[in-house]
Image (tube, coloured by chain):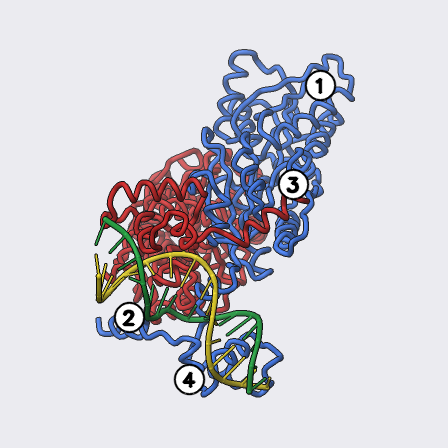
Chain colours: A red, B blue, C green, D yellow
Amino acid sequence: MYFKVYLALSNENKLTLAGLAKLAGVSTSTVSRALKDNPLIKKETRESLQSLAKQYNFSLNHAASRLRTQKTNVVAVILNLVDDTDQSISDPFLLKVVGDLNQALNQQGYELLLSNSLMANEDWANYFISSSRADGIIVIGQGKNTDNVEKVAKAGAPLVVWGDPKVEASYAVVGSNNDLGSYLATQHLIDGGCKRILFLGDPEHAEMSERYKGYSRAIKGANLADSAELTLSCDITSKAAYEAIDVAILEQGLFFDGIVATSDMVALGALKALKERYINIPNDVGIVGFDDIAMAELFHPALTTIKQDTKTAAKIMVAQLLKQFNGDNADSAVVDIELIKRKSSR
Amino acid sequence: MYFKVYLALSNENKLTLAGLAKLAGVSTSTVSRALKDNPLIKKETRESLQSLAKQYNFSLNHAASRLRTQKTNVVAVILNLVDDTDQSISDPFLLKVVGDLNQALNQQGYELLLSNSLMANEDWANYFISSSRADGIIVIGQGKNTDNVEKVAKAGAPLVVWGDPKVEASYAVVGSNNDLGSYLATQHLIDGGCKRILFLGDPEHAEMSERYKGYSRAIKGANLADSAELTLSCDITSKAAYEAIDVAILEQGLFFDGIVATSDMVALGALKALKERYINIPNDVGIVGFDDIAMAELFHPALTTIKQDTKTAAKIMVAQLLKQFNGDNADSAVVDIELIKRKSSR
DNA sequence: TTGAAAGCGTTACCAA
DNA sequence: TTGGTAACGCTTTCAA
C-alpha cells in the first residue's frame, strides 16, 4: 500500500525540535521555550512558533523529555490481587477505583500505567521508579500480604495505597472507614430486628478485618440474647459466597437472620443462594453489602449497602502522591462512608 | 526523617550502566549486551555481570532506552466513550475488556497506558505515537463517531479497534459477531413462544446497529402474526433502560412479551422495571441480554445472554497490533459468540 | 530576548 | 569476544 509506505517514511524523518527550529530560523532553545509558553521569549516569537508547530503537526518526543528532565508524568497503578483468590481484575469495585483514579490523574496531567501484581515480579520500586517508567505508584488493595508494598515504601518511592487507613503502616494509606461502615451495617440490621447476624467474608484480609471489628463491636454493644458472633469465612467473590452459604445452610440449617457481607459481590452471592431456597429477603434474612457498586440497586431486592466514595478517594490519593513528588510527606486519610438503605434489609 | 533524606540522596546518584561498567571493569557496551543476554558476550562474562547487576539492584533507565531505540513497549488503550451518554468507565463490560487486554499485553511484554477519549484532545496519533508515549493504540468502542479513529488510521499509526468487524473500515476491527449474536437471541425468544419482541437499545451505535440487524432478520424470518419490529431506543445504561421501559409501559401497557437487549446492563435495567410491576420473567416477558458480564447469573432470574469472549478477543487484538509493529498489515477478526441460556427466557 | 552547547542514559555501529 | 563512540531529541545553564 502506497499510503502506508509513504507514512512509514515520513515517520522516519519525523520532525524534531531541531528541525522546527531550522524551519523557523531560530535556535532549539527558543523553540523549546516558546512551546512551553515561557515568558522569557517575546510574545510574538512565542505565538508564531506555536502556530508553526501546529501547522507542521509537531509533537515533542516525550521519551527525550523524560530522559532530560527525569520526570515521566506517569503513575503506575497496581492491582494488588491476592493470587490464591478469584478476586480478579474483573471485580467491579476495583475497576471503579481504577476508573476514578484515571480521571483524577488525568486532571493533574498524569497518565495511568495499569499493572497487576502478578506481573513485574516483586520489586515494584525498581521496575517502575528506578527504571523511570513512572514517577510514583498507587497500589490498590493491601490484600493479606503487604510485603511487596513495604518494600516499595522502604525504597523511598512515592507511594499511596488504597486499603485500610487504620492499619499501621510506614506509607500513606487512603481508604474508607471500614470499621464504622461495618458497625453501621450491623447496627442497622440490629435495629431492624435481626438477632443472629452472620459476618460473611474473609476476616484475615486487611480491610476486611477492620470490617470484622466494626461488626463485632456492634454485636457486643447490642447485648443480644445469644450475642455470639457468627462468622462464615469465604473468598471475596460472589461465587465463593454463594457456595459458602449454600453449604452452611445444608449442614446447619438457617442459623442466622442477618448477613453483614464484606463486599457487594459477596452479598449478592449470598442473596442468590438464599433466594434459591425461597428464603425471604429481608424478612427471613436481612443483608447489607459493602461498596455500593453500580449494580447494587438493580438487584431484587435492591441491596442495602455501605457506599465507598471512590471519586473523592481517588482525588485524595492523587493529591497525596503529588505531595511526595514535591518532597513533602504524605498522610493517610479516611474517606467517609454512608449507609445506603435499600430493600434487602428492614 | 533521616531515612527519606538518605534515600533521596541515593536516588540522585542512581547507578547507571556506565557506573556498573566501571564497577565491573568493562565497557558499557558489554554490560548492555550482557544484561540483554546477548550471545555475543562470553557466557561467564554475561552471568557475572548479571549477578553484579542484581547485587547492586541495578535497573535500566527505560526513558533512555526508549529514546535510543525509538520503542516504548507501551500500548495506549483508549476508552472511546460516547460523551453524551452515561456509559462510563464504570461499565463492567468495558472494564472487563481492559482487564483482559492488560493481561494479554503483559504476556507480550507490553504495558498498558489507560486513557479515555475525553482527555488527550482529538489527535491521538500525535499525542501517543509521535510523542513516543506508546507504540500503538487500541481503541475500545467505535461509538457513534469514528472520526477520531479514522484520523489515527490515516496517520498510519498502529491501531486496532474493538467494535463491529462488519463495519467497513480502513483499520483492523476486532469484535463479536453481533449480528449473529442478536439473531440467536431473538430466535431463542421466538422458539420460546414470544410473539412481540422488543429491541431495546440504541440502534445508531455501531455495534448496536449490527445487533439490530440480527434481530430484524430473525423477526422477518419468523413470519409472526404481527411481525412488526418493535424498537425502544435508549442509552446503553441500566438506568436509561429502566426508565425507558417504565415510561413505555405506563403509556402503552405491556405491548411486548420478549426483549432483546443490546447489553446486559440494559437488560438488567429492563428486568428491574418489569419486576417492579410484578410482570413475570420469563413467562410474561422473556429477556435476553448481551455481553455475559460476571453478574449476569447472579440476578433473579439469572440472565440469558449472548456471551462475548473477551479473553480471546484481547489476545487477537494484541496479536494484530504486534503484526503492525513488524510492518505487516493487520486484519479484522470476528470473535465467536455463544448463547448462554439461563432463567430469564424459556 | 535569544543562542551555544553540554548532558540525560542507553544502544549499536564499527573497529580491534 | 570486547571496547570506543556517536547518536537518540530534548532541556537548561551560561553567555551574549
Q: Report the amino acid beneath label 1.
A: Lys
Residue B280 is situated, as x and y percent measured from the top left of the image, at: 61, 25
Q: Report the amino acid beneath label 2.
A: Ala
Comes first in the chain, label 1 or label 3: 3
Residue identified by numbered label 2: B8
Task: Say the numbered circle drawn on residue B22.
Answer: 4
Residue A41 is situated, as x and y percent measured from the top left of the image, at: 25, 48
Task: Say the numbered circle drawn on residue B210.
Answer: none
Q: CA distance from mark 1 to mark 3?
A: 30 Å
Quarter occupied by the C terminus of chain A = top left
Foreground mark, 4 or 3?
4
Foreground mark, 1 or 3?
3
Element under label 1? loop
Q: Viewer-proximal residue, A341 or A229?
A: A341
Q: Report the amino acid beneath label 3.
A: Gly
Instruction: State whether residue B21 is above or below residue A65.
Output: below
In the rendered image, which quarter is residue B345 located in? Answer: top right
Q: Report the amino acid beneath label 4.
A: Lys
Residue beneath the point at 50% across and 52% down? A14
Disc 4 to disc 3: CB gap under 8 Å: no
Q: Chain of mark 2?
A: B
